[in-house]
Image (cartoon, grey):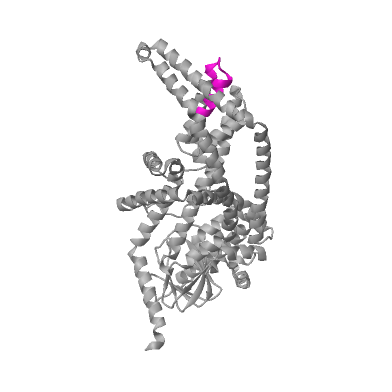
Amino acid sequence: MLGFLRPARGSQLEDLKALSLFADLSVRELKIVQGVLHERDYLAGEVIFDEGEQGNALYIVRTGRVLICRKGRPDSPIAELGAGSFFGDLALLDSAPRAAQARALEACKLAVFFGSDFLSLLETEARLANKILLQLSRHLGQRLRGATMLGQHAEQHL
Amino acid sequence: MSGPRSLEPAANRPGPVAWAGIFAATCLLLVALNHILWLVIPALMALVLSYMLEPPMRRLMYAGVGREGAAAIVTSVFLLVLMAATLALLAWAGARAEDWQAGVERYLRGGAALLERTLAALEARWSMLARADLAASVTTWLNEYSDTFLKRQVQPLAVSILAWLPAALLGPFFAFFFLRDGRRFHGFIARAVPNAYFEKTLALLHEMHQTGRSYFTGLVKLTVVDTLALGIGLWALGLPGPWLLGLIAAVFAWVPYVGSIAGCVLVVLVAATDFPHDPAIAYWAIMLFILVRLLDDFVFMPATVGKNLRLHPLVSVLMLFVGGAVAGVPGLALVLPLLGVTMVVGAALSEILTDGRLRARHAYARRLREAEDAADLA
């Protein structure tokens, strides 16, 4: 009955370590992050979040696949993400509306990292949070470079 | 005080129906809590204590100690410090036990003498007051009141403090479990919420946590700042025991308005008794209290408790009257933080329940689950 009193399993630390976002974290730091994550199960077709909805959390795909698309246009996806990837990362930085819809392509298990928990970490465990922040900046930089290159290719093609 | 940013968007404000629900819920909660004060007080103490002990616990966790061990260490250290302080206080108070009753009576007489002198001076200036025989009637009433004060007020207060002591000891016990299992309980609640409402509910829990934390930790900081400000002022006026008087007055101020007046009366009594021939000291003490009250409202409070509750001053005052009427002194102390929390819950619930898209997503997810459960039945 009081299942919530049982300690969280530590076997998922390796999966967390494999994520680029948490690649620099020590085992102790990973345990702290693991402690603030929420596990959720989604069925195939279930909406995880909507385009335009206020963003509060980053999602990590533990198992299954997730589709990122425009609202109401799942047939023309922006991206398909598998286990070990994450999405909704901008919610760690601000609560701006989501830029796209996320939908489970198949039954999947997600870990959810709330922006408020990240901000609390920034206050209490600044070194840990800064490591995540650095990785997040690198990830966003890569995406920006990718988008720029895509734009250049499109211009050349035209 | 810079805290994590609020995740509540500015546009989401409750309407009149939600506000009516928020006020009704606050009043009902006050009535309910007033009946279980023996549990509410230690739980609140534990909450404040857990907010205070959380940073050192996190430091220990960061140094490699497990959550359970870190919670046990910080709670044990706190209990040891508390026991040492209590023993020292008992030893100090026990040595002066005989002086207490005489002291209280002496200070009451000193206050009465100051009031009598002030009224006599007013009567000398305004004949209308003299004709009403104000000084004599007030003095007669005050003498009758102070004669029975110890029996009617102080003794029952001492007995009720002794009766509350076992309940107060529950505080550190609760705090240990709040620290150890708080996050797991948070996760347990989150798991019970359907996927469609999950993000908004977690944002609501965070907002509630932040509201409670900023109010109570701010209150503790405000007490320290008030003690320092009053202590310095009373020390400059030459009053005996300025820091203890400042601390008592600052703790009294936890009960809005009424507490500040009670603290001021206490200091004026001391000033009037210890400086019977210099009433200016008592008047300066009143001025000091007004100054600290203004500093509280415009400088200290925004910097400590903050404007996180975002209450309109008129609403605050009205709710204080309601709190006092519904649940007495505990109601006065509890009504504002309680209103702050019900405001957050009411605003979030009205937003979640009126969001058609979220309801549609939840209904769709339920249909998907039903279809999955029935897949092998066809």
Q: Is residue B113 above or below residue A22?
A: above
The residue at the far bottom in this view is B378
Q: Nearer the viewer, residue A155 or B217?
A: B217
Q: Residue at the location (44% across, 65% down)?
A: B198
Q: Nearer the viewer, residue B107 or B304?
A: B107
Residue A127 pos. (x, y %): 64, 56
Camera sees residue A1: yes
Camera sees residue A122: no
Residue A101 pos. (x, y %): 42, 69
Q: Nearer the viewer, residue B88 or B246?
A: B88
Left/right of residue B330 with respect to residue B250 in the rendered view: left
Q: Nearer the viewer, residue B254 or B304?
A: B254
> Which corner quadrant of the image does residue A131 belong to?
bottom right
Residue B268 is covered by the magenta coloring: yes
- In which quadrant of the rendered image does the C terminus of chain B lie? bottom left
Q: Is residue B218 above or below residue A142?
A: above
The boundaries of the magenta stretch are B264-281
Q: Is residue B56 above or below residue B242?
A: below
Residue B176 is covered by the magenta coloring: no
Left/right of residue A145 with respect to residue A125 in the rendered view: left
Q: Residue at the location (57% across, 61% down)?
A: B181
Residue B43 pos. (x, y %): 52, 52
Q: Residue at the location (61% across, 51% down)?
A: B53
